[in-house]
Image (cartoon, helix red, strand yellow):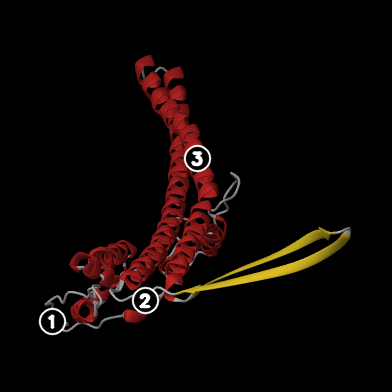
């Protein structure tokens, strides 16, 4: 009896030692730290250039020096529904990130119950009250870095949505600016069409007088009239295109279709020049490139999470003990 008990205790100590060794061997985090790959590039050109980082930090659309364009962009950034949607998406992923890090902290469950009993004994009623409070505290120790990896992946996805928001902002600003410049171009085309129609009308009037005087034939008169009517027919088409662009601008700024005021023409608006020697770091500021990097960080963290799930499921003290018993 004592011998069998001693052997059993010896087995327990032996397997406990093995489990402890395995535990401390495999309990290190399985999350691999993301390291940004280094790119062998020159810091300077062979020819020395004066880099203008201050120009790159400015709001580029202000280089046109058009207050109407600035107001349209500000209104679009405040009212555009796409920006509102992506802002709500950022809040969604921020909530997901906060919920992911929750298991790192102790979980407390409290259950309170009350019971009243009425007992009748020989005609006498006895009322008894009983109260019960259960408190359960649980805490998952993140030995293999599973929760940490999920938290890192959620943070990368949150930053991904932040970059997606920046991409939407850049797209909205570019679209408003491009549409506004197209509108100014259509205004210039309309002015040219009106001037052309006016000159064609004067040309046609002269041909009418020459035809009445018998200097030219009816064929030449009809050719002059055709050129005049063709120039005049182009004006309604340009009016239609201008209205469409104004409606498009109204949609971009989140407003009802309306007439857009213009303070400058295509010839008087300032054309910002791109300075030479802009730093190459500007490429790394592109939202789509940053989104791709955040996706890579998230995928790298999820690989560690998968490894942690494997070890937490198949390599544990309980599995070793039951397998050797």
Q: Which residue in the protein does label 2 denote?
A: 141
Residue 282 at x, y percent in the picture = 29, 72
Assign a secondary structure to mark 1: loop
Q: What secondary structure is found at the residue carrying circle 2?
A: loop
Q: Is residue 150 above or below residue 43?
A: above
Looking at the image, residue 129 sits to the left or right of residue 13; the answer is right
Where is residue 304 shown, x and y percent of the image? 24, 68
Give the camera-side residue of 255 and 141.
Answer: 141
**Left or right: residue 27 compared with residue 165:** left
The span from disc 3 to disc 2 (Cα, nearest Å) is 62 Å
Earlier-in-chain disc, 2 versus 1: 1
The image's mark for residue 168 is none
Residue at 25% in and 76% down = 29
Asked whether disc 2 touches disc 1, contact meaning CB atoms under 8 Å apart, the reply is no
The residue tagged with tag 3: helix, strand or loop? helix
Location of mark 3 (residue): 244
Q: Residue at x 56, y 60 (%)?
A: 78
- For disc 1, the marked residue is 47
Comes first in the chain, label 3 or label 1? 1
Picture layout, residue 238 above or below residue 162: above
């Amino acid at each position: 009896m004592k011998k069998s008990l001693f052997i059993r205790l010896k087995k327990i100590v032996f397997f406990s030692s093995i489990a402890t060794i395995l535990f401390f061997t495999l309990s290190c985090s399985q999350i691999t730290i993301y390291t940004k790959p280094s790119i062998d590039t020159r810091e300077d050109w062979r020819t020395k250039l004066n880099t203008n980082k201050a120009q790159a930090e400015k709001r580029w659309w202000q280089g046109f020096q058009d207050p109407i364009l600035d107001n349209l962009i500000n209104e679009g950034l405040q009212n555009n529904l796409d920006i509102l949607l992506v802002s709500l998406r950022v809040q969604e992923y921020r909530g997901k990130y906060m919920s992911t890090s929750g298991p790192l902290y102790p979980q407390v469950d409290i259950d309170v119950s009350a019971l009243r009993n009425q007992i009748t004994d020989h005609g006498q009623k006895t009322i008894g009250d009983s109260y019960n409070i259960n408190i359960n505290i649980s805490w998952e120790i993140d030995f293999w870095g599973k929760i940490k990896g999920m938290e890192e992946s959620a943070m990368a996805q949150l930053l991904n949505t932040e970059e997606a928001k920046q991409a939407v902002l850049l797209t909205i600003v570019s679209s408003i600016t491009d549409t506004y410049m197209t509108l100014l171009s259509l205004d210039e085309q309309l002015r040219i069409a009106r001037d052309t129609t006016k000159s064609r009308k004067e040309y046609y009037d002269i041909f009418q007088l020459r035809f009445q005087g018998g200097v030219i034939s009816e064929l030449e008169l009809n050719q002059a009239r055709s050129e005049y009517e063709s120039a005049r027919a182009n004006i309604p088409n340009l009016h239609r295109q201008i209205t469409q662009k104004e409606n498009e601008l109204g949609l971009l700024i989140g407003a009802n279709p309306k007439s857009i005021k213009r303070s400058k023409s295509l010839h008087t608006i300032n054309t910002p020049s791109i300075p030479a020697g802009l730093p190459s770091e500007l490429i790394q500021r592109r939202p789509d490139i940053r989104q791709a990097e955040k996706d890579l960080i998230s995928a790298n963290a999820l690989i560690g999470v998968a490894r942690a799930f494997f070890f937490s499921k198949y390599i544990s003290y309980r599995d070793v003990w039951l397998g050797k018993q």
